[in-house]
Image (tube, grey):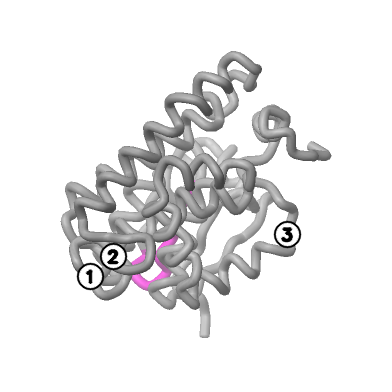
Amino acid sequence: MAARYQLFYWPIPFRAHFIRYVLAYAGQQWEEPGFDAVAELKDRDAADQPHPFMAPPLLIDTLTDTQLSQMPAILMSLGRGHGLLTEPDQTLRLICDASDILFEITRYHGALMWDAASWAEFHGSRLPRWMQIHERIAIKAGVTAEQGFMRGRDHPGLADLVLGALWHTMIDRLPPLRPLLQANAPVLEGRADRIAAEPPIAALIADWAGRQPVYCAGRIEASLLNMLNMETDT
């Protein structure tokens, strides 16, 4: 059966893993055309793009012949379309939080590289605070490390998948950050691990396990790994 969706994104986890988590959990098939196709489409003049956009991700729904760019818009659309969206305002807030965190951990999408002073401030203050914020939200929603999903659901919703994609991808691809998450947000860590253990998500993660162990790639990843004292060939 032909895949319903086409996802245009670089062959790295980062932003696209949020979309991949949702597609996988919703039982949807999708294709990813690959780096060259993404680069070619991104670099076209806006008038020549099927859907004008600045940068991936871009998701094409072949069933409805619609295209969407921007991670938050794509996630909200998929959540509605596949019955995963409750409390839209609060869910959108968490998606926007995730975008902010990705912006910060890549030093404004690579506009700057990490150095010891800037990393110390981020690792020692801002990143723990983000973890603590999401920990409090999870606890207020009735979640524990061992059980439960947002707002008493008996299965993950879009908000759960977003937080799982954010935090599990980070600690999976950047293992030295797991102790920081554990110290500041043990409920969040447990819930992220439980989301990752859901069979469709676990299969996705296993598929990526054998690929190049990158998070966001490029020079910014090299500077990030240097701060974490991780080996890199980048």
Q: Which mark is residue 153?
A: 1
Q: Which residue is mark 3?
A: 211
Can residue 59 be seen in this snapshot? Answer: no
- Magenta-drawn segment: 57-65
Numbered circle sitting on residue 149:
2
Whether residues under marks 2 and 1 lie with C-beta atoms below 8 angstroms apart, the answer is: yes
Camera-nearest residue between 96 and 59 = 96
Observer able to see residue 195: yes
Q: Amino acid at mark 3?
A: Arg
- The structure residue drawn at horizontal position 31% and vertical position 38%, both measured from the top left corner, is 133
Quadrant in the rendering for residue 225 = top right
Instruction: Answer left or right for 125 relative to 134.
Output: right
Q: Say which residue appears at 45% left-offset and 32% top-offset.
A: 127
Whether the magenta-drawn stretch holds residue 35 is answered as no
C-alpha separation, residue under disc 3 versus residue under disc 1? 33 Å
Q: Earlier in the sequence, mark 2 or mark 3?
A: 2
Which is closer to the viewer, label 3 or label 1? 1
Which amino acid type is marked by label 2? Answer: Phe
Q: Is residue 143 above or below residue 92?
A: below
Sooner in the amino-acid sequence: mark 3 or mark 1: 1
User: Residue 82 appears at what percent x and percent y?
Assistant: 30, 71
Q: Residues within 10 Å of mark 1 (few under 14, many from 20)?
A: some
Instruction: Report how far apart the C-alphas of labels 2 and 1 lie in the structure.
Output: 5 Å
Whole-percent x and y of residue 124?
Answer: 50, 25
Between 32 and 188, the one lying in front of the other is 188
Element marked by disc 1: loop
